[in-house]
Amino acid sequence: MLINKDEILSKSRKENKNKDLYDIEVQTSAGNIGSITAILLATIFFVTQSLVGDGLDFGLYAIIFSVSAAGFIFKAIRMKRRRDIVLSILYTLATLTFSVIHIVKLIENN
């Protein structure tokens, strides 16, 4: 049984809901680069703040880890892969830990 090119393209469009796979790959890469940039900037701010003697701002890392936590939670729900589930739990725990430390430090300083 031969399937013609138009049938294959039609089935592919239905499966991908007319989304270009290259476009999806570029968006994914852009998101990853954005996350890495945010992590680097947060690290620079964190180190600079600690070096100038203004304490440690764990709120920055809570925000950064929340981005990864949300991404892995989404992937874990959609893909149901053990790796994504474990990473979503770890990033969520890190987010909660940094958030609690940040809030406790804010309360202590007031």
Image: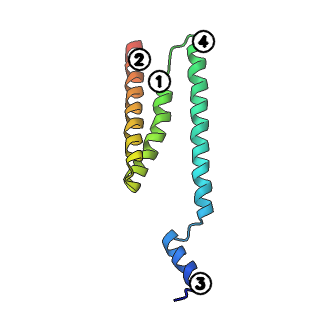
Q: Distance from label 1 to label 4 (Cα)?
A: 16 Å
Residue type, label 1: Phe
Give the structural element (helix, strand or loop) at label 1.
Answer: helix
Label 2 sits on what residue type?
Lys
Q: Secondary structure at mark 4?
A: loop
- With 7 as the anchor, is 95 left or right in this view? left
Q: Which mark is residue 52?
A: 4
Image position, residue 33 (x, y; %): 61, 43
The kind of residue on which mark 4 rests is Val
Q: CA distance from mark 2 to mark 1?
A: 9 Å
In this view, the residue in front, 62 or 21, is 21
Q: In which image quadrant can residue 105 be found? A: top left
| Residue contact at pointers 2 and 1, CB within 8 angstroms | yes
Instruction: Give neighbour class at mark 2: few <14, some 14-19, many 20+ (Cα, 10 Å).
Output: some
Q: Nearer the viewer, mark 3 or mark 2?
A: 3
Q: Amino acid at mark 3?
A: Asp
Residue 79's place in the image compared with 86, above or below, is below
Q: Residue at x 37, y 25 (%)?
A: 100
- Reading the image, the residue beneath label 1 is 58
Label located before the other in sequence (4 or 2): 4
Query: Which secondary structure lies at badge 2?
Result: helix
Disc 3 element: helix
Disc 4/disc 2 C-alpha distance (Å) = 18 Å
Q: Which residue is mark 3?
A: 6
Q: Give residue 101's quadrant in the image.
A: top left
Q: Is residue 13 above or below residue 47?
A: below
